[in-house]
Amino acid sequence: MRTQPGKSKALPKSMATESPPNDAIALLMADHEHVKDLFDQFDGLGERAMVSKKKLVDDICNELTKHTMIEEELFYPAVRALGKQFEDDIDEALVEHAAAKQLIAQLLTMDASDDLYDAKVTVLSEQIAHHVEEEEGDIFATVRKSALDLVALGSQMAQRKQQIPDPAR
């Protein structure tokens, strides 16, 4: 983008800053994409990149911890209140969260050079990919058609997410 002398050098609004997602589902999907990108970065690291691996895994664990908390505290109860048709999906999601939390807790206490470190990251990535596929494929489409105020819920979720400390720090 060229600028003329005397003209503002500000970027167009869409490029200047990333705007936060405007509803609960958009926020969760943005989280999903961000964590997928972090896992992809991890997969691209060499065997000796121990410092980079540990930093990425700490970031993954931080993001997943915050994400699961806002889902469990705000999103899932709101979805469950929509009716019994969501009961099984939410129950399964909670079990998937519990499994992920176990791996997260283990990874946060490990060094990148420890035995099974990479294997645990791979299993966590696979579990999260499965969870995301089910959430985005089964739950989100139906919730989007409901009367749930996704913008208000998204605002609450974004605010809560900001309050949660990073577990890896």
Image (cartoon, rainbow, N blue to C red):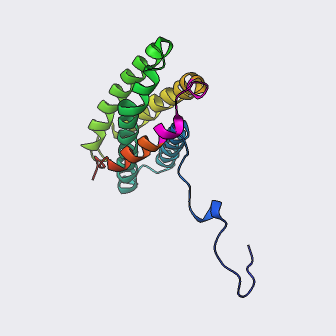
Q: Position of residue 141 (x, y in %)?
A: 60, 26
- Tell me what residue is drawn at x 46 percent, y 12 percent: 84
What segment carries the magenta color? 143-154
Q: Left of 51 or right of it: where is 32?
A: right
- Tell me what residue is drawn at x 40 percent, y 50 percent: 56
Among all residues in the image, which is located at the extreme bottom? 5
Examine the rendered structure and indicate whether residue 161 appears above or below residue 87: below
Q: Position of residue 43 (x, y in %)?
A: 49, 44
Examine the rendered structure and indicate whether residue 57 appears above or below residue 137: below
Q: Nearer the viewer, residue 45 or 129?
A: 129
Q: Position of residue 88 (x, y in %)?
A: 45, 13
Q: Left of 45 or right of it: where is 107?
A: left
- Tell me what residue is drawn at x 60 percent, y 65 percent: 16
Q: What is the tally of numbered marks visible in this picture?
A: 0
Q: Left of 157 or right of it: where is 141?
A: right
Q: Position of residue 1 (x, y in %)?
A: 73, 72
Examine the rendered structure and indicate whether residue 112 appears above or below residue 18: above
Q: Nearer the viewer, residue 30 or 119?
A: 30
Residue 158 included in the magenta stretch of the image: no
Examine the rendered structure and indicate whether residue 43 appears above or below residue 68: below
